[in-house]
Image: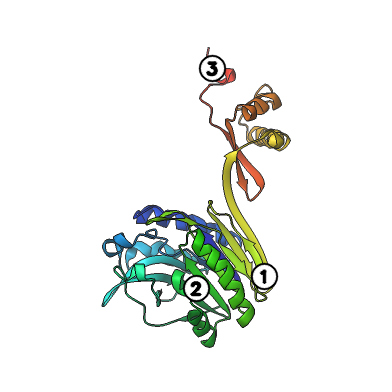
Amino acid sequence: MKICIAQTQSVKGDIQKNIKNHLRFIERAITYKADLIIFPELSITNYEPQLAKALATEAEDKLFNPFQEVSDQKGIVIGIGMPTMATNGINISLLIFQPNKEREVYSKQLLHEDELPYFVNGDKQKIFTINGKNIAFGICYETLQEEHVVNAIKNGADVYIASVAKPQNGINKANEHFPKMVKTYSTPVLMSNCVGACDDFMSVGQSAIWNAKGELVSQLDATNQGILIYDTETDQSKSEQLIIEKGTLTDLDILFQMYKRAKEALENDKIYQWTNNYPTRSIIENDLKDGILYVLKNNDKIIGAINIGENQEPEYKSD
């Protein structure tokens, strides 16, 4: 099966905006034919314990209908992070959407002491069978407790997936802990972490995959959103991470050829926006020297560019 790990940046308390962002990532996972996509801890609200009581809801809330619809139509299983109501308080939960099935919830069983004023423990581990693989989930703090991993494996887990919101010290612990667990129990571990401000800390991404040998298969960076795709049958992975940064003169040849192809594509559609005098190699070079040309990269490959300078090119001035 193909498992997608999403590394996202959520907006504090903005459920609708975060849902839209999630749906974009799900679309990307579908293009890779992923069977399952998992998001970071409390990804729909951001990790904000003090807002949890006000934002908590139930899995059947119609807010989440778009996820069920995509799951039904595309055959993908989706796991999103959300505070949910429990009889004795609020849980930190993963809402699981499966094609043409009732929604299910896995709630964090082992809470960090800082979470106890806001949340209560979930009551049981769950194993989800997806495309013939038994999948166990863990949520942040509990994933670093060996007992949680061991219990999941005893219950038949073939793959363990950690949905987390971790600062750098937490990631350091994860990078030490998960390879040891994998080597001991020969069970692949995948970790989905968020990026950006969370509660009183900065979450630093570095979402990762460790195969059954304890080898680090792939890892994203610490600051940008992206996805990792892991094929459990071939032990191969793919990543997609969009990064915007200032272009450099070393990018000149690639950018010039990209602009040329864009001009040709426009003209094939009878759109004559650009002429032979714009954009030219020298214009692109000057924009790079002036630090106003930014590039969009998918991993290390340039796939787009934009000039954000305030000066208008002469070619665009009207008479």
Mark 1, residue position: 215
Instruction: Report the residue marked by disc 2.
Output: 144
Q: Does residue 160 show up?
A: yes
Sequence-wise first label, 2 or 3? 2
Q: Residue at x 66, y 66 (%)?
A: 217
Q: Secondary structure at mark 2?
A: helix
Q: How is the image coloured?
A: rainbow
- Label 1 neighbour load within 10 Å: few <14, some 14-19, many 20+: some
Task: Give the amino acid at mark 3.
Answer: Lys
Q: Decide: is 200 above or below 183.
A: above
- Report x, y in % for residue 242: 57, 49
Q: Mark 2 and mark 3: span between their CA atoms?
A: 60 Å
- The reply to whether residue 97 is visible in this rendering is no
Please tell me in which quadrant of the rendered image residue 115 appears: bottom left
Q: Quadrant of the N terminus?
A: bottom right
For mark 3, what is the residue?
A: 317
Mark in the foreground, 3 or 1: 1
